[in-house]
Image (cartoon, rainbow, N blue to C red):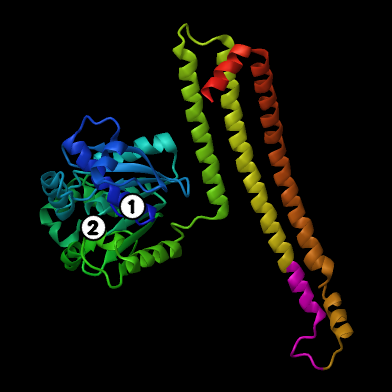
Amino acid sequence: MKNSNISTLDASNWTYEFEKLVIDKPKTINKLSAVELRVGSKLPTHLEYLDSTYDNKTGTSGTAFLDKNTGEVIIAYTGTNKDGNAVQDIVGADLGGIAIGLGVHYQPAFDFYETIRGRYGDNITLTGHSLGGNVAQRVALEYNVDNTVVYNSAPLYVNQTYGFKERLYDWVTPGESNVERIDQQRETFTGQVTRITTKWDQLNLLTGPFRDVHLGEEYILKNSGGHGLNDIVKDKGQLTQVQKILKQRGLGTVTTVEKKQAKTLETVKTSLANLRKLKKQFSASGGGLSSNEQLYLEKEQALILASGIHAAAVTGREDIASLAEKAVKKAEDLYAKTNHIPAMVTELSLDEVKAVYAEAGVTENSIVGKTKTHFEKKVKKADNFVEPFETLKTNIGLTVDELVASDSTLAGEIGHAG
């Protein structure tokens, strides 16, 4: 499978493969390896597989990935899978859920979102293609999710196929129907939804004339083709457009600070995983853990976490210092302009111009000096925040070293594991 290096696009594409696997071989334990073998290519290096779900009754499925570039979690909901559960999707979701607004396929998607949010927090972006885009929009609405990116998305519902009987039911039982709930939640929704559509997408060409209901802003790709994702992934021109759109929307771009923080998080995760392996090796000899082994594991875990917090604090301090340096440079450049006679001034000398500036309070101290003082305080505050974590990290490291030095057996086990 060709990868695009666009996280939401790749996640939307790969979630189809995880659904196919679960349908064909539901008891598979190592899903990632099985999917990669089946597809004949590796998951993009910027994504890490976290978990997936599939509901037999509705055909709703989704896959969660970690975006290693940003540290955020991406939940990709699956569209109508012609190689998987096409019957369930078309009958249960496409017709029942969208065309007549029943929404029978949403509850499993809600459940999966809550599970992933419970494990990894609120830093989640939703995505999906086709029916998966419909599900992503509905989940975004239900939980007021900050960012959602969908590709050739099905609408939340189609206005002209939601008929008199359904609206009468809404009036008799207020607040109970899917469409009524959607309409109510749209009034208070504050998230950002980016809908990327190809020019000749058959789905949107079909539903558009019937007043289909979506969230967010639609962006139609120039010189684009039909409904499938691979049409986008395999075309450099379309990929460039997608990247530009996401950048304009403040998505898919990663600052140096974000990269450093994501790397810190990855280092902590790897270190904790290695520590779990070491615990298994300690336990393999039988008889449980010795008191020193248990103490070492506890201290080492504390050291890993303290090191991670310290690294994150240092990155924050460096960012503040960098901003301070830029601000002072701008102030110096601004003050330097006072050493020149403005073009519109013809009757005053340079000394007279400087005197006018000084009388108005425009001095080196007021522009440069005060800026320096302001940001020096900010940098000092950041230093004060970093120092306790540096001390904590150092002290824990010393106790770990002392423990290992005092127990040759423990030192040997650690050396063998390394």
Residue furthest to the top: 287
410 vs 22, nearest the viewer? 410
Left or right, 17 with respect to 394, comes to: left
Q: Position of residue 53 (x, y in %)?
A: 27, 37
Amino acid type at image mark 2: Pro
Residue 181 forms part of the magenta stretch: no
Question: Which residue is the site of mark 1?
Answer: 10
Q: Position of residue 37 (x, y in %)?
A: 26, 41
Residue 341 forms part of the magenta stretch: yes
Question: Which residue is the site of mark 2?
Answer: 155
Disc 2, SS: loop
Which quarter of the rendered picture does the C terminus lie within? top right
Amino acid type at image mark 1: Asp
Residue drawn at (74%, 73%), measured in percent from left and top? 334
Q: Residues within 10 Å of mark 2 (few under 14, many from 20)?
A: many
Q: Position of residue 321 (x, y in %)?
A: 70, 53
Look at the image and give the residue range highlighted in magenta. 331-346
3 vs 61, nearest the viewer? 3
